[in-house]
Amino acid sequence: MTNFTSLETTPRLLVVATGNRGKVVEIQEYMADLNLQLQLKPKDLEVEETGKTFLANACLKASEVAKATQKWAIGDDSGLTVDALDGRPGIYSARYAPTVAEQIERVLRELENNPNRQAKFVCALAIARPDGTIALKSEGICCGEILYSPRGNGGFGYDPIFYVPSEEKTFAQMPPDTKRSLSHRGQAFQKLLPQIKEIFL
Ligand code: ITT
């Protein structure tokens, strides 16, 4: 008997394993040219972030959502690491305070007037097969400085306090395509896209 499913070998649909709107918008842009159908993860499907690293958590998100939906899935775990705060908030960036405004406030309060404002945004991406095994992963980093007060209205999350000296702007002040090309997520996608194309195109 002919197995018709075996004729369709190239996956065309990818579930985006995030509930963060800001990430969804950016991920859509990175994948815009791929002619892939992106689907949001079911709202009630929460993945517990028990990993100790960004990469471990990105793999967990991709893998759990892939298994639950039986589809290919992409996970993103990212955050801000501040040198003078021993790398905090790091993998706890989303859990640093109940609201984004309070998360920013906490980072600024903990840094006080410390002259060392060096920080990095880190983004780990992972793509899982429908059985939950990891097919691809990558990591990107963007270096910058934490301002003394927020600037700009664009982007999301910690963007208004993350200043990139080469652009003389915070992520929240940059045109979206500038942030997209030099951000941590941009670096991670740059490494991943050629491999994504091999699987999906
Ligand atoms: P999912 O787990 O559903 O993807 P999340 O928001 O909980 O959503 P993370 O655990 O990866 O995602 O936490 C990321 C945190 O880092 C969160 O507070 C974001 O606001 C922040 N963050 C990540 N990328 C960012 C970016 O490009 N600009 C500003 N903040 C960012």
Image: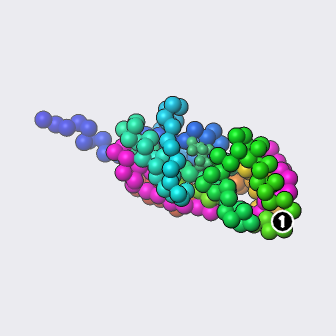
Q: Position of residue 125 (x, y in %)?
A: 52, 54
Query: How many marks on residues?
Result: 1
Look at mark 1 in the image and give the residue it sits on: 114
Residue 98 visible in the displayed image: yes
Q: Residue extending furthest bottom?
A: 116
Instruction: Say which of 27 and 112 sits in front.
Output: 112
Image-based side of 57 in relation to 121, left or right = left
Q: Position of residue 86 (x, y in %)?
A: 68, 65
Q: Position of residue 94 (x, y in %)?
A: 64, 46
Q: Is residue 129 magenta?
A: yes
| Vertical relation: 76 (above or below) 3 | below
Range of magenta residues: 126-154
**Residue occupying the point 51% across, 31% down:** 44
| Vertical relation: 16 (above or below) 197 | above
Where disc 1 sits, the SS reads loop
Q: Residue extending furthest left?
A: 1
Q: Is residue 131 magenta?
A: yes
| Vertical relation: 138 (above or below) 160 | below
Residue 190 visible in the displayed image: no
Q: Quadrant of residue 64?
A: top left
Q: Position of residue 106 (x, y in %)?
A: 77, 50
**Residue occupying the point 53% across, 57% down:** 52
The quarter in which the N terminus is drawn is top left
Image-based side of 158 in relation to 73, left or right = right
**Residue occupying the point 62% across, 59% down:** 122
Mark 1 surroundings within 10 Å by alpha-carbon count, few (fewer than 14), some (14 through 19), many (20 or more)? few
| Vertical relation: 49 (above or below) 21 | below
Image-based side of 194 in relation to 26, left or right = left
Instruction: Say which of 58 and 85 sits in front.
Output: 85
Image-based side of 126 in relation to 130, left or right = right
**Residue occupying the point 80% across, 44% down:** 153
Q: Amino acid at mark 1?
A: Asn
